[in-house]
Image (tube, rainbow, N blue to C red):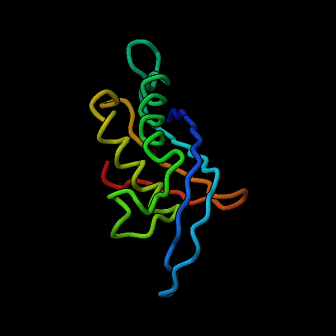
């Protein structure tokens, strides 16, 4: 099994509602780690070109940079928790790069660090 990892950072605020109580809006320096896996390399000896994944991850995270996550349509109905942010990034990345990855690679996991030592990971099952 081969694996590549791409990271990105962004700054954003959010306010979660926990047990019916909305916390104050506060910011984080978010760190995103995307892992792709596959059992074969392409004809160039690559699982996937790093730049392809990196540009897509940055395009997704740039939408959040210096914003309040609660203001984004995707989070209007759901808490913008680290778990939901990881899930959203994984889904968006799959939609943007899946055709260029197949059949050699797939998005295996997206981890989002909200604060040092606080990491949420989403592992897509259907991709």
Residue found farthest to the bottom: 20
Question: Disc count in the image?
Answer: 0
- Residue 40 vs 30, above or below: the answer is above
- Farthest residue, direction top: 44
Q: Residue at x 38, y 63 (%)?
A: 75
- The location of residue 11, given as percent across then percent down, is 59, 48
The picture places residue 31, in percent across and down from the top left corner, at 61, 47
- Where residue 38 sits, quadrant-wise, is top left
Q: Vertical placement of 39 versus 16: above or below?
A: above
Q: In this rendering, would 108 be left or right of 24?
A: left
Q: Position of residue 93 (x, y in %)?
A: 38, 41
Q: In the image, residue 68 lies at what x, y percent? A: 49, 57
Out of 106 and 122, give the one closest to the viewer: 122
Q: Nearer the viewer, residue 121 or 105?
A: 121
The structure residue drawn at horizontal position 47% and vertical position 38%, both measured from the top left corner, is 36
Image height check: is 123 above or below 36? below
Q: Is residue 127 left or right of residue 3?
A: left
């Amino acid at each position: 099994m081969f694996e590549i990892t791409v990271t990105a950072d962004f700054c954003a605020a959010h306010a979660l509602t926990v047990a019916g109580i909305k916390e104050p809006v506060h910011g984080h320096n978010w760190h995103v780690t995307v892992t792709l896996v596959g059992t074969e390399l392409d004809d160039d000896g690559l699982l996937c070109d790093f730049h392809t994944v990196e540009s897509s991850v940055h395009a997704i995270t740039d939408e959040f940079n210096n914003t309040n996550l609660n203001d984004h349509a995707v989070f209007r109905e759901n808490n913008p928790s680290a778990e939901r942010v990881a899930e959203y990034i994984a889904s968006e990345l799959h939609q943007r790069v899946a055709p260029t990855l197949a059949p050699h690679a797939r998005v295996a996991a997206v981890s989002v660090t909200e604060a040092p030592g606080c990491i949420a990971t989403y592992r897509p099952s259907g991709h």
